[in-house]
Amino acid sequence: MAEITAALVKDLRERSGVGMMDCKKALQENDGDINASLDWLRAKGLSKAAKKADRAAAEGLVAGKISADGKTGVLIELNAETDFVSKNETFQNNARAIADVALGVDDGVDAISAGKTAGGELVSDVITNMIATIGENMMLRRAARLTVDQGAVAIYLHNKQGDDVARLAVLVALEGAGDQAVLKEVARKIALHVAGTPMPPLALSPEDLDPAAVEKEKKFLTDQALESGKPIGVVEKMIEGRIRKWQEEVVLLKQPFVMNPDQTIEQLIAETAKELGSPVAVKSFVRFALGEGVDKGPEGPDFAAEVASMSGKA
């Protein structure tokens, strides 16, 4: 059997990111063969991932990147079980690396997972290896990609945890043939607005609102108005006005700009177009708040039980 030296263990640890004891065991199981040991650790990681896959993962990070030409931007949400992991340097670096991959592929999670990082690793393997190393369930939950032919895409990161990573992030894509630096700055200000407004926008314009959301709000307002005892004819006219007001509150273009409440986002765009001497339009926006919509279950993971199991006491 090959001698398992400290240098060999260190080499495997640096390649895999897995703990020293697991690296030593992998080398022992594979007669000191580095490549076979890497495969062994990957298989072990897959086993650990399967055991943890049903545990809620609502913490982690949102990572965002903008392409070198400023015309494409991406957001990815990489989840873990605890807030502690978001401060882990390896986790942060891998979130950035996954965002870099997302710049080069379609915004689908499957396409990104099948992509390779600059280091040549599959994104899916990167996540599996982190599960094995850190010991929490993790997942690439969602991703978004905005691009323009002419104009700029800008990003705003709120509650940053490090470079390019945060707990809330917004992308805004502005179309226009004018000065890209001006468009980028205006897009950044709108992204800040989307992150900071008390009423996060549901859509770009009234026409873009989800019909189901409109019907839900209409029903709520109708039930509320009927409780007043007013005739149905009066209620219907009241609802028309209230729905219009609600739409102005929840669509981006109609909202008062947080940096200048006397001006709407629509008016800010018109002012920018006048300044540049050419048409400007918000093509799209996307807002990722970490963990939104995740079912966290009745309780968190039982780490005490896991520790006991690992020590052979359970």
Image (spheres, rainbow, N blue to C red):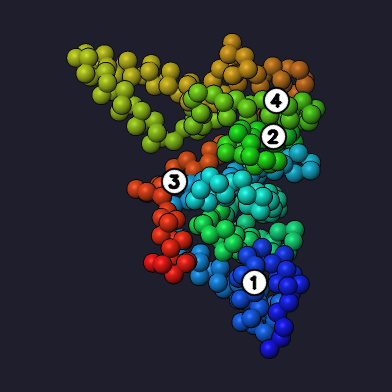
Residue under numbered circle 4: 186
Residue 54 lies, in percent from the top left, at 42, 59
Residue, x 59% and y 62% (percent of image)?
Answer: 133
Marked residue nearer the N-terminal end (1 or 2): 1
Instruction: Point out the frontmost of discs 1 and 3.
Output: 1
Question: What is the three-letter code of the residue carrying label 2?
Answer: Ala
Residue, x 70% and y 72% (percent of image)?
Answer: 9
Query: Which quadrant holds residue 117?
Result: bottom right
Question: What is the three-letter code of the residue carrying label 1?
Answer: Cys
Residue, x 50% and y 57% (percent of image)?
Answer: 137
Q: How crowded is mark 4: few (under 14 residues within 10 Å), some or many (20 or more)?
A: many
Q: Is mark 2 on a helix, strand or loop?
A: strand
Cα gap from disc 3 to disc 4, whole angstroms: 32 Å
Q: Which mark is residue 305?
A: none
Cα gap from disc 2 to disc 4, whole angstroms: 9 Å
Marks 3 & 4, CB-CB < 8 Å contact = no
Residue, x 66% and y 53% (percent of image)?
Answer: 90
Using the image, determine if residue 218 lies above or below residue 274.
below
